[in-house]
Image: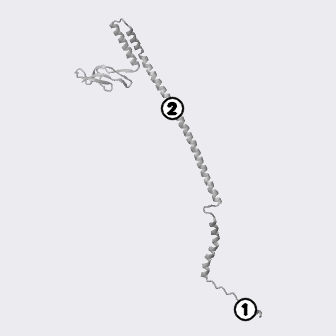
Amino acid sequence: MSSEETKQAAPQPEPKPEQTPAEEQEKKPETAAKAAEPETAEASAKPEGQEPAKEQKKHFGKKKSEADALREQLDAAVKEAAKQKDLLMRTAAEYDNFRKRTEREKNALYATATADTVAAFLDVADNLERALAQKDCAVEDLRKGVEMVQRQMAAALEKLGVKELGKKGEPFDAQYHNAVSHIEDENLGENVISEVYQKGYILGERVVRHAMVQVAN
């Protein structure tokens, strides 16, 4: 068999069918999808929630700075609380000292005032004792002794700043007088004191005892 016959006897490959433009467009997305599959698979292979090292470092640094700021605020708050506690303790101690000092001064003042009052009446007490020590005494002498003691008593009250309340003929004042009876008298004015049964006394603006009086008209 000649070479030409051999060439003719060999089977010829079938020609591929030509693709239309529409079929080529349909195959292009499939090719792109196949090319993207490895990348998608690689991305899905990474664990969820895992960030790149740089992002993690940045996030950690931010958290650390926030923690440092909170720690500084806490330290400042602790120092301020200690300062306020110390101030409170000092104030409480000062107030306690002031209270005790005031109490001592008050007691001392009361004792001093009482002592001054007692001292003002000591002469009166001495003269009363002398009068009682007299076994034989005339009535006139006894009267003179009582009058002297009465003058000493008035002087002692005046020294203490005590004044008498209630005199006959004065207008009646319920703030200073205590009316125990009432009469009608044409010789006296309206609402005046006609009789004093017991004198009253006043110290400054404080009434020590109201005068017991009779009021006319």
Residue shown at the point (29%, 22%) measured from the top left: 213
Say which element carries label 2. Answer: helix
**Residue 176 falls left or right of residue 53:** left
How many numbered discs sit on the rendered protein?
2
Q: Which residue is mark 1?
A: 9
Image coordinates of residue 57 in percent, x first then y, are 64, 57
Residue denoted by label 2: 96
Instruction: Give the quarter of the image for residue 138.
Output: top left
Of the two numbered discs 2 and 1 on the same chain, state the one appearing first in sequence. 1
Q: Which amino acid type corresponds to the residue marked 2 in the rendered image?
A: Asp
The CA distance from mark 2 to mark 1 is 131 Å
Q: Position of residue 202 (x, y in %)?
A: 36, 23
Above or below residue 113? Residue 94 is below
Say which amino acid is labelled 1. Ala
Name the residue: 42% across, 17% down: 120
Q: Nearer the viewer, mark 2 or mark 1?
A: 1
